[in-house]
Image (spheres, coloured by chain):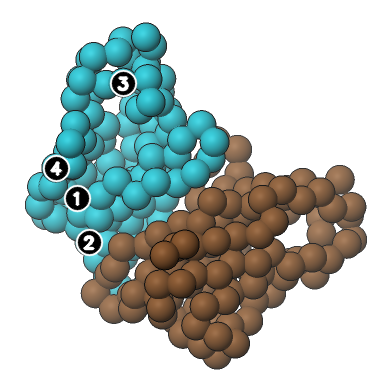
Chain colours: A cyan, B brown
Amino acid sequence: GIQVEQSPPDLILQEGANSTLRCNFSDSVNNLQWFHQNPWGQLINLFYIPSGTKQNGRLSATTVATERYSLLYISSSQTTDSGVYFCAVEGDYGGSQGNLIFGKGTKLSVKP
Amino acid sequence: NAGVTQTPKFQVLKTGQSMTLQCAQDMNHEYMSWYRQDPGMGLRLIHYSVGAGITDQGEVPNGYNVSRSTTEDFPLRLLSAAPSQTSVYFCASSYSMVGGHEQYFGPGTRLTVT
């Protein structure tokens, strides 16, 4: 099956700093999503981005499907950005429909 | 829209007990699924459904049953709880998965089996 690797596993930032999180995947995909799991455990949809670039406020994401990676950019980080960021993909082969394969996440801590 | 809702939020079971985790969505999504999240890990798929009356197994189905009698509801049943089933359970839904669609997750149920 598809392998999803996220880096770095842990990241500590000072408030106001910028960061880039990376997601590598081992096969072609139908679906790639970025989630933020907040300290209360809730999974918040950030981006649905199987290819291309999207922006939402201070966050943006780019997926280069041909090279099998995605990047999540966080600019001017705030303490509320703390939590775990997950990348999840769905393969485009038979039997993979709906099965999101998650990476192990990047744990982000933003210090005031 | 309430989105995807799950009940209960927390549950403690003794080994061998059974229970049902409830999941409902009001977005008329065809596709629903259950995942579990263990400490320090991403989510893993337990069971999924592509429409009412149709279910299938995911990556970690053992010890769990599902059924889908309506579009809105997708309950997950633990037949005989084991400590290995201590986890956080998430339900998700989306439109048809053909071609890939964005999935939305419920708030989760934290289950402890003693």
Q: Secondary structure at mark 3?
A: loop
On screen, residue A2 above or below A97: above
Label 1: which secondary element:
loop
Q: Chain of mark 1?
A: A
Check residue B91 in the rendering and tell me which mark sits there, or answer none.
none
Marks 2 and 3 close (CB-CB < 8 Å) = no
Q: Nearer the viewer, mark 4 or mark 2?
A: 4
Query: Depth check: B100 or A69 in front?
Result: B100
Find residue A55 and name its label: 4
- Asked if marks 2 and 1 touch (Cβ < 8 Å), the reply is yes
Q: Calculate the distance from the C-alpha at mark 4 to the C-alpha at mark 2.
A: 23 Å
Subunit ID for the residue under disc 2: A
Residue B67 visible in the snapshot: yes
Q: Quadrant of the C terminus of chain A?
A: top left
Which mark is first along the chain, 1 or 2?
2
Residue in the picture at 61% in, 54% down: B89
* Residue under the point 19% across and 50% down: A68
B113 is higher (above) or lower (below) than B54: above
Alpha-carbon span between mark 4 and mark 3: 17 Å
Chain under callout 3: A
Q: Callout 4, which amino acid?
A: Gln
Residue at the bottom extreme? B53
Closer to viewer: mark 4 or mark 1 = 4
Residue at image position (54%, 36%) is A40
Q: Position of residue B114 (x, y in %)?
A: 86, 45
Please state if B83 lies on the left or on the right of A82 as rendered. right
CA gap between label 4 and label 1 equals: 20 Å
* Residue under numbered circle 1: A68
Q: How far, Cα to Cα, is label 2 from label 1?
A: 7 Å
Q: Amino acid at mark 2?
A: Ser
Task: Say which residue label 2 marks.
Answer: A28
**Secondary structure under badge 2?**
loop
